[in-house]
Every structure is written in structure tokens, then in C-alpha cells.
Image (cartoon, coloured by chain):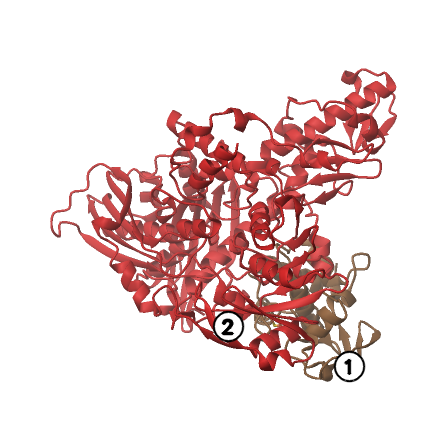
Chain colours: A brown, B red
Amino acid sequence: MEINVNGEAHEVDVEDDMPLLWVLRDELNLTGTKYGCGIAQCGACTIHMDGLAVRPCQLKASEAKGRQITTIEGLGTPDALNAVQAAWIEHQVAQCGYCQSGQIMSAASFLKFKPNPTDEEIDYAMSANLCRCGTYPRIREAVKTAAAKLRGEV
Amino acid sequence: MSQLKTITRRTFLVGSTAIAGGVAFGTYLTKKPHDNPLAENLKNGEASFNPWVLINEEKITLVVPHMDMGQGVASMQAALIAEELDLDFGQFEISFGVPAAAYFNTALASEAAPFLSADESIPAKTMRTLMSSVFKIMGLQVTGGSSSVPDSFFKLRMAGATARETLKKAASLKTGVAVEQLKTAGGHVILPDGNQLAYTELAKLASELKPLHNNELREPADWRLIGKPMQRLDVVEKSTGTLKYGIDLAFDEMLYAAVKTNPRKGAAMQSYDDSLAKKMRGVSHVIAVTNGVAVVADNTWRAFKAVDKVDCEWSEAPYPAEQADHWAEVVASFIPERLDKVWRDDGSITWSKDSYEIKSEYKAPYVAHQPLEPLNAIIKVTDERVDIWVAHQMPRFAQQKVASITGHEEEQIYLHNQYAGGSFGHRLEFENVLLAAEIAKQVQGKAIKLTFSREEDFAQDFTRQIGMASGLGGVDNGQVVSMDLSIATVSSSTSQGKRLGQATPGPDKQIVEGAWNLPYAIPNFRVSAYRVPELAPTSSWRSVGASTAGFFADCFLDELIHLAGADPLAERIRLCQDEVVKQVLITAGELSEWNKPLGPNQGRGIALVESFGVPVAEVVEVTQTDNGIKVDQVTVVADVGQVLDPVNFDNLVKGGVVWGLGHAMNSEITYADGKVQQRNYHQHEGMRMHQCPQIIVKGLENATKIRGIGEPPIPPAAPALANAIFAATGQRIREMPFNKHIKFV
Ligand code: FES
Ligand code: FES
């Protein structure tokens, strides 16, 4: 089947019900998207489908047909950072970093809908992503900075 | 030499205390530096001055032997070398090095010796030196025990200085300018006329010189990097999904493996039926492995799916099947026959029947490590060599274990250490490496990537120790006068030692760590350790013994202080005999505005625990709301002697608070039918963001020794919260997880 990831069409030969996560990681070698729990609990795998944050460990490959998939690699690169990634670097959020692709993808999608979120809204939205290293205080700050960047204030 | 090795092997232990016969080896061997592993593979014109610096015509490589599991140790180690070598970030590459004896960890050993960390008496020093020697002979390259900073602080700066002086010597030979007139900056030797010679240019000449040792280290006032905020070397990669963890690596023709092993840990598999699995798409092998079965396929998910379809018959667990029986064994352990050691006995504790004024019992459950990157390992076996790609805290042990499975010589095993997606002690264990080796031995010639499913990872995780404490105490005249704490836990050191093939003779200090070393002069103060016979296997969980004993000790002290009618902070300060620790308490009081009145339904609690030589005080503020307890704010003060990077320090301390609080509030591992009942994060999630308080962090630098901060913030978090809940509600919670007794927002 054909799936479109980061603006490129890929032909993959997989079962309809293979979770999109494993298509990305093992078939397309897009390993920025992480496996953490496989049951929609941790958010490490978060990507965008048609601009919306989704969990590909819960999406069948066939459900991605005809959709635009964006992974962390497509959001921005070290040379062309997305505003959210830039905020993450500015605040030195990462410890082990394993959760951070998912955190950044969640935040990027959230800020599209809530460009000026309150603290409670940030906490509520980001609570779906687990960070075992406990970088939450920095994630909070980085989301606020990213929001300001996206609004063009900084 | 081989004789020596057996002696030290048999008697060496991590986290415990006795070294039987440990003096047999004298000092010669320990004084002799280990070979420089970089010297073996030097190409022509490449200079290596010591095991940490490698320079050739193209580039400079700094070797950072401690595994980076998120604590930022790769950047920190590089900064220490770069400080003396006059390199800027961006001018060098880093490498995790090869497992080698030269990278032995001297600092972890000194903490294993049974003396208060501030104790500089002759026996204490002798014992610490001795422990370091054991580690050196063992060639132990261990990342753990918050030891990376103390291990590296002098060694790596010295390595930088040696390289710098040798390069200057080379420049002097080349130009005829006297060494005294040369300076270094930004990766260059600078001549008096302003001309510059790049280190890389000098590499060939320098490689022919004898490295110049015994250089003076720079004064703190001259530091460019240490103590200043650094941008971590990996932060851009970790924010763009471009950093490859072990689980992300891929090789040509690589195959993907999954395992299912007996969820009754350590018990055998009786039989299995793989008829369904074998027929599934992409599956190439179904293999029996120790205590279970492995599937090899062409994609991780296909391997997961197929292994799930293998039907297995499991043997019974070698430990009690039900959780209640684990607790019963702990309760039954407060008996003279199980007394491990009385660790502290100040004044005299003489309870006649019921003469104490208070008796309390505390409980701490099993808890899982579960870093977000599940266990994994890639192994490729051929006749000539074995390659292992894995993130491991003890790479040399991992190599030995693999050699014992594949039958290769240790020299034929190449371990490529990787960035870890967290560890918290999980990557001190070997299950992933052992199983991957078993599979790769049977499927040779191709790289095999074994990934644990999260469910398998939970099932096989060696948890924190389970334990209880019983406290008796007395007060007089508004002061705490007697505290008698008995602690019974299983010995995680012994459990871990068994898997390492290391005997752990003597008492286990971890049972009472954080309690026996309370820095308080309570007139009558006794701490006794009881050893619960091994139940389910356990291991080192971030902060190890102090995560349980620190909770017991500080909470019980808090009870006594309340009984005395004293102020929790003032009484701790009054009892404190150590000036460094006292300053930590005083600063925590100031920073948290301890004396400022709180609103209705609010409460404030303080705890102080010293672990890994670092005293940490935490003040927690909570509010009782209609929806449960809300943790509002935590103020943390720690004294590590020297803060190397304030940004990383702040991040690690906050993470430690989240870890300590989250598990104390929400998480435990329990057994039923011999199996772990919690198999994914919804059943054991630690903390999520909505529960995360504001955290205020302050590092003090009064202590004379430099220490690491990865673990010490954890132990005081749980008692400070329990004490705060008491202050807000009048309810004493004496059992973790607290959510068994009170609701959290
Ligand atoms: S792996 Fe998808 S949410 Fe955890
Ligand atoms: S940074 Fe390690 S899990 Fe979030």
C-alpha cells in the first residue's frame, strides 16, 4: 500500500493491521517516532495525521492511506528547526530524551488549537505524554516559549 | 594474577560492605595503571595521551566511559577534559569508548565502604582506598551510584591537562619556542607572535612524545566551562528525533526478535507449542531460550505478534506466589536470627515493656524501573567475533556474560555502548543481553535486534526491595530524646550479586541507607537492620536503599518531633551536628519561607536524607481540595560540593523529585500467581504532568567533596510529602504508595 510520510509517498508491503508505528520504524527507518507502551498510554509514538496528534501504535497501517503523516523528522530538522523544537532546545528540556519526540509532536499539535494556553490547559494536554525522567517543569516552560514564538512575540 | 582475580571476584560486592580476605592483593597491582585501550588501535600519526583523549590530523575525540542514560554525563565528562585541554564545544567528537579496565570507577567503590561519608578517620579512609582497589583490579566500568561526577572530576581534568602539556611540548619542538611562552586556546597552541597551531596539526609529532603527567590543575576562578550553564551536546538531536538509541539502530539483513519468558521470574518453561506462530507472516525462527521462547521475524511487530501466539507451560515461581505471603515474610523478619547488623547505637536504648511513647510501622512496596526505552539489544555472532549494540551500565560484565554463552574469547566480543532512553538502575541487569546472545548464537551471521515488549519488560523487571520498619521513640521537654528504628528488607545487593556471580558476604548497608547515617545527635539513637530472606528477585532502583530507609527514618523522626510539640524544621536544625547539613536545612527553610503562614487546608512538610554523600532537604507544600491532595510546591536544597552545570543540575534534581514523589504517590508492583500484576504504564505510571508541582532548586557548595546528583534528590521526596499531608490533614501515611490511603488530584 502507499502511505505519505513527511511529504513523500512510500510503497510498503505490510498487513493492513500492522500498527503504523512499526511501519514507520521498521519499514521506513523513521526511528524518531518511539515505541514506549504500544497501548496509547505513554505518547512516545505521537505523530501528526493531517495535522492532528495521533498515536500510531493504535493506528492500523491501512488507516493511514490517503492521509498526510508527519513525524518528528518532518516537523523540523537540526538545520531548520520548528518553533517548538527551538523552544525545547532553548529550555534544555531533554534528559534521556526518549519521550521528547512525542512530547514535541503533542505540543505542536496542541498549540495549533490553543495558541495562547493557560497553565491548566498545558498540564491537561501534556499529561497524556509520560516522561519517566520527570522533565515536566521544563516542558511547561518550553510550551509557553513555543506558544510565544508561534504567535510571533519572540 | 589469576589467583588474585578469584580472590577479589569472590569477595567483591556492590552496595554492601564486607570484603572478606580483601587485603590479599597488596598495592602493587592497584598502583599500576591499566593499559590504555586507545593505544592498541592507534593509526600512524594518531596521538593518545591517556584513555580519554585521541587526536589525529582530522579530529579530536574525547572518550566518555560512563553510560549516558539521561543524566547528561557524556557532556559533563567532555566538559571536564575540555576545560583543561582548552577546547570549545563543537571542536571535538565524543565516543563512549570500548569496555576497558582503564575506565574503572573509583568513586562508586568509596561509597560502598561502611563509613559516614563525612568520616575522614583513618579506618574510614583505609577502607575506602581498599574498596577502590578492588574495583580497579576488577576493571569495573560501572555507571551507577551517582558516582560519575566524583569518579571523573579529577581524572578527566588531569587527562585534559596531560594532553595540553604534551601538545605544547610538540609545538615547542616544532617551532623552537620555549614551552613557557606557549599558550593554548580554542583547540590551538598559540605562539607569542599570535600565530596558532591546531592540535590536529600537532598530533603526529605529539604521538612520538612521552605524555607529560603531573600537571597542575587550574584554579576554579579560571574555569571557562565548569560551573557555567552548558548546552548539552545531545540536546539538538534529542529535540529533533535524530539521536539513535540502541533500539533505533538498523543493519543490513537485520532480523527482529521478541521473547516471552516465564512471568514467574527465574522459573523454567516446561513445554511450548509454536505451531501457530511458525506459520505467521515474516517469522523465520521460533527458538527455545532460557525460561522461555523467542521468535525471530522480519519486523518487530510480527515478532511480538507471533511470540504472543506461542502457547507455553510455565513452572511454579521460586518465591511465594501471592503478595500477602511476601508481606508475611517481611513481618516475620524482626527476630534476632535475622538481625543483619546494628548500624548505629548512640546513647542507650533501654525499653522496658511499653516504656516508649510511640510505636509506628512503615511499609515500602516493590516498585519497577521501567525507563521509557524498553530493554533491547542487537547482537551479531560470527565465528570470528561477536558485536553487541546495547546501552549498558556495566559493559565489561555484559561482555563476559555474552562470551560465556557464545563460547568466544572475551577479546572477540565488541560491545558498542549506546545512549540509553533512561535506566534508573534497569540497565545494570543482563536479561536482554543474555537472551539476545542466546538467539544470535542460534541465528548466526546476521544482526538480531531483540526488543522487549513493554509487557515483557514489566514482567521481567527486577524491582526495588520490599520492606518494613518499626519505630519506637520517646520525647522529653519538647525535644526528641530516643529513636529506635528497626528496618527489615530483602537484600537487593545480594539478589543482584547472585546474578553477577558475586558473593556478597557480610551485612547489607543498603537495608538502612539513609537511616543509619541520619546526621542528628539524638541522645539515644539506634538503627538495626534485619534481613528478609530473598523473595522475588530485586535490584538497584534509583537511589537504592535510601528510597525506602530514608522514608522510614525521616517520617518517624517527624512523628517524634510532633509528639514533642517542636517545630519540624527547628528541631531538625537543633539536632543536626554537621555544619554542611545544617546549612542545607537552614537554606531550605529560608527558600521555602517555612515560617510564612499557609492558607486553610494547606500543609507543609520537610524531610532531609543523605545518600551517596549528598545531604538533600525538601520542603513540600500541599492543599487538601475537594478532589484530593494537590502537591503545590517543592523546595529542594542539596550540597554537592561543586555544581558542574547549573542547568543540568536543576533538571536532574527536578526529575528526581518527580520520580520520588510519583512512585511514592501512585505506584507499586505486586505478585499474584507468582506473576507481576502490573504489565504496562496504566498500572504503574509514576507521575504525569498534571500532578507535577512547582519545584524550586538550590545547589550549595559547602561540602569539601564533589558528588553526583542523579539519585540523592529521591529519598527525601516521599517523607517530605507524607509529612506535609500530615500537616494539612492530620493523617499520617506510613505506607507507599500513598494513594492506598489518600486521594490525589
Ligand atoms: S507507544 Fe504509542 S502511546 Fe505508547
Ligand atoms: S526525557 Fe527521559 S523519558 Fe522524558
Whether residue B743 is visible to the viewer of this picture, yes or no, is no
Residue B423: give x, y in percent of width and height: 55, 55
**In-image side of B665 versus B393 (left or right):** left
Instruction: Look at the numbered disc 1 and give the secondary structure of its residue.
Output: loop
Q: Which mark is residue B682?
A: 2
Residue reaching furthest to the left: B353
Badge 2: chain ID: B
B376 and B381: which one is in front?
B381
Mark 2 belongs to which amino acid? His
Q: Quadrant of ligand 1?
A: bottom right
Q: Which residue is mark 1?
A: A67
Q: Residue at x 24, y 53 (%)?
A: B334
Above-or-below relation of A133 to B410 = below
The picture places residue B260, in percent across and down from the top left corner, at 54, 70
Name the side, left or right, on which B714 lies relative to B193: left
Q: Is residue B243 above or below residue B255?
A: above
